[in-house]
Image (spheres, rainbow, N blue to C red):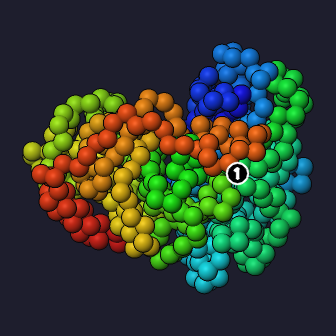
Amino acid sequence: MYIGLDLGTSGLKGILIGGDQAVLAEATAPLTVQRPHEGWSEQAPSDWISAAETVFDRLAAQKPLGGVRGIGLSGHMHGATLLDARDEVLRPCILWNDTRSHEEAAELDGDPMFRRLTGNIVFPGFTAPKLLWVARHEPRVRDRVAKVLLPKDYLRLWLTGEHVGEMSDAAGTSWLDTGKRDWSDDLLAATGLDRSQMPTLVEGSEVSGYLREALSTRWGLPKGVVVAGGGGDNAASGVGVGVVRAGEAFVSLGTSGVLFAANDGYQPDPDTAVHTFCHALPETWHQMGVILAATDALNWYAKLIGTEAARLTGELGELQAPGKTLFLPYLGGERTPLNSASVRGAFTGLEHATDRKAATRAVLEGVTYAIRDSRDALATTGTRLESLLAVGGGSRSDYWLKLIASALDCPVQLPVAGDFGGAFGAARLALMAATHAGAEIATLPPIARVIDPDPALADAFDAGHARFRAAQSAIKDLT
């Protein structure tokens, strides 16, 4: 058996699979985000360990873990987990959706070396600018930094006692030479760091260490359980859903929104604000368009009006053409294609006819138009999408899937019931590390149904997207 752990922003999920990849048990533990100031987003790494203990307890209660041979890790990217020489955490982890370091990001991005070596814009959410911010605003903390770990790699430290990272997550730090799949000494030096403060790197399907004996004893696992390199959340989701070969793609409707395409070569184009990262498998890369608020935007709206998101989407009925009301989902800045930490969201075109359903449709449409912006950015690099797998919590809404298919003019494939996300991908990577299997086991899931675009609404959504872009231009300098 193999365990996959996925450290998400709102919770940690564990999944147990057999050698045939059938799911044997699942467990989750909730997490919360602290926002002490505008634009800040933090979590206590000790909460991740508590959540992992809960998940192991719950998995072991469902199925004895004596047959486990490997553990894989997935987690939210870019977080700055700062440790001292004794591996004590120095401050709360600064998360991926924290935008406080926008000035430092712009400063680093002004050095052409960063885009040239990393293949990406230096975004405020990335790890390197966070370290510059800490150096300037919390110098006593910065002086004590002995290791910088990404969130899932702090879980690995707890599991194995080793400081190890892997390529897909490291590619989101602005310290990795993404083409060479190695830390860049020049990039590290530009932020006052060196290789000794970084984890050792392995590929996601390689062994990164072995489960500590005390943990094996605690939960009844055998000795010598391997811990795989794993992957950043989206790369692990790519492995989980089988998007590991060129031409395959998925759209993830989670807290953030991701349009993800696998590539068998390295083809960066930083000017598009598309992420070009290493995949979790050797000699493979991927591209992503990322929007910061997908289901996060819907959940924000649901909370605002005092109801549940699922109830809102369940009320909508058949897909309709967009109305006059528009929603721009920039609740905390945006990545692709705007690369802006300061832009904020808006409703426009509000009128007497804007009722609850119309506003809900506008929120879903706004997120969908933002995903379409990512599709257009990917297209400028030569990446074309012939179909999309849909994953994430938002994919439970038929209305939203029909909307995406029609607004992007692209069939959307919905996998059969099951979780093919980051935790499942991490479990697959554990299987690879333990058995030396390769990408051939990362198959596409069976497809329950395909949602085709509605050609009768194509012009309406084209016009709606054009109005969205105009509103985007109008508000981007107002905040």
Please tell me which residue is depicted at 33% across the width and 60% down the height of the picture. Answer: 372
The answer, for residue 190, to whether it is visible in the render is yes
Question: How far across and down, in percent of the image, does residue 103 sit?
Answer: 56, 73
Identify the amino acid type marked 1. Answer: Gly
Please tell me which residue is depicted at 56% across the width and 53% down the height of the picture. Answer: 244
Decide if residue 170 is on the left or right side of residue 198.
left
- Name the outermost residue toward the left: 352
Question: How far across and down, in percent of the image, does residue 201 sit?
Answer: 78, 58
| Image vertical order of residue 201 relative to residue 12, above or below | below
Question: How far across and down, in percent of the image, does residue 347 sit?
Answer: 25, 54
- From the image, which quarter does the N terminus lie in? top right
The answer, for residue 44, to whether it is visible in the render is no
Please tell me which residue is depicted at 26% across the width and 56% down the height of the picture. Answer: 409
| Image vertical order of residue 55 relative to residue 297, above or below | above
- Neighbor class of circle 1 (other Cα within 10 Å; few <14, some 14-19, many 20+) is many
Please tell me which residue is depicted at 58% across the width and 31% down the height of the picture. Answer: 30
Kindly indicate the quadrant of the structure image that contains residue 199.
bottom right
Of residues 37 and 268, the one drawn nearer to the viewer in this rendering: 268
Of residues 251 and 309, the one drawn nearer to the viewer in this rendering: 251
Q: Which residue is mark 1?
A: 204
Of residues 307 and 49, the one drawn nearer to the viewer in this rendering: 49
- Name the outermost residue toward the front: 440
Question: How far across and down, in percent of the image, does residue 95 sit?
Answer: 60, 52
* Secondary-structure class at tag 1: loop
| Image vertical order of residue 24 relative to residue 292, above or below | above
Kindly indicate the quadrant of the structure image that contains residue 134.
bottom right
